[in-house]
Amino acid sequence: MPRLSAILLTVAALVLAGCGYHPMYGSSATSPGVAGSLAAISIPEASDRPGQLIRNELISSMQSGRGEEKYLLNLTTTVADNGVIQKKQPAVTRQAILITTSYELIDRSNGKVLTKGTTFSRVPYDVIRQPFADLQAQKDATERAAREVGADIRTRLAAFFARQSQSS
C-alpha cells in the first residue's frame, strides 16, 4: 500500500509540473512574484485600535514597505460589539466582536483602483461580570478578529497579484 501511494504522489507531481503549475508565492530570476508585489504595498496609519491591528498584521505578513512602494492600500474599518446570548442564570453573557473592513488597492503611478473588496470577522467572547476579565476577553476577541481580517485581505491581494502575473 505505501508503494501505491508513492506512485500516485509521483504521478500527481508530474501532472502538475506538466500543466505549468507554480507556487503562488514563488519568484523567478525575472520576476519578484507575488511576494515582491505584496512587499511593494504601503498602508497608511489607522485612526482606531482595530484598524491599527489589521494594518500591523498586513505589514508583518506581507513584509510591506520593504521595497519600492508601487501600491497604496486604503482600509476602512468598522467595529460592532453585539450580544449573542443573554441568560439570567448563570450570570454569563455571550458577546461578539464584529470587524468589517473595506479595502482598495491603488496603483500609485496613475491613481487607478486595481482591486477592492470587503471582508469581516465575527469573534464571540464571554462576559462574566468581572471587570478585568471582561475587558481582557473583549481585547482578545478584537485582536483575533483583526488577525483574521488581515489574513483574509492578504490572501485576496495575493490571489489578485497571482492572476495578474499569469495574464501578463
Image: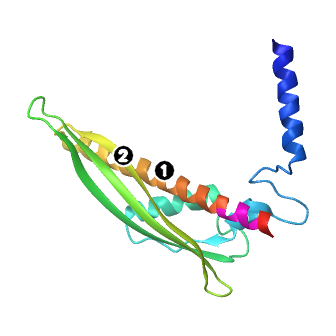
Image point (84%, 65%), residue name? 31
Up-down relation of residue 28 to residue 90 (above or below):
below
In this rendering, position of residue 57 left or right of residue 129:
right
Which region is colored magenta? 160-165
Q: Which residue is mark 1?
A: 148
Main SS category, magenta section: helix
- Tell me the element at label 2: strand
Along the viewing direction, whichever of 26 and 41 lies nearer the viewer: 26
- Can residue 63 be seen here? The reply is no
Using the rendered view, name the quadrant where residue 134 is placed.
top left
Q: Position of residue 125 (x, y in %)?
A: 30, 41
Residue sticking out furthest to the left = 88
In the image, farthest residue toward the bottom = 110
Q: What amino acid type should be assigned to the residue bearing mark 1? A: Glu
- Front residue of 165 and 78: 165
* Residue at 37% across, 67% down: 48
Report the disc number at residue 156: none
Q: Quadrant of the C terminus?
A: bottom right
| Amino acid tagged 2 | Val
Q: Return the residue at label 2.
A: 123
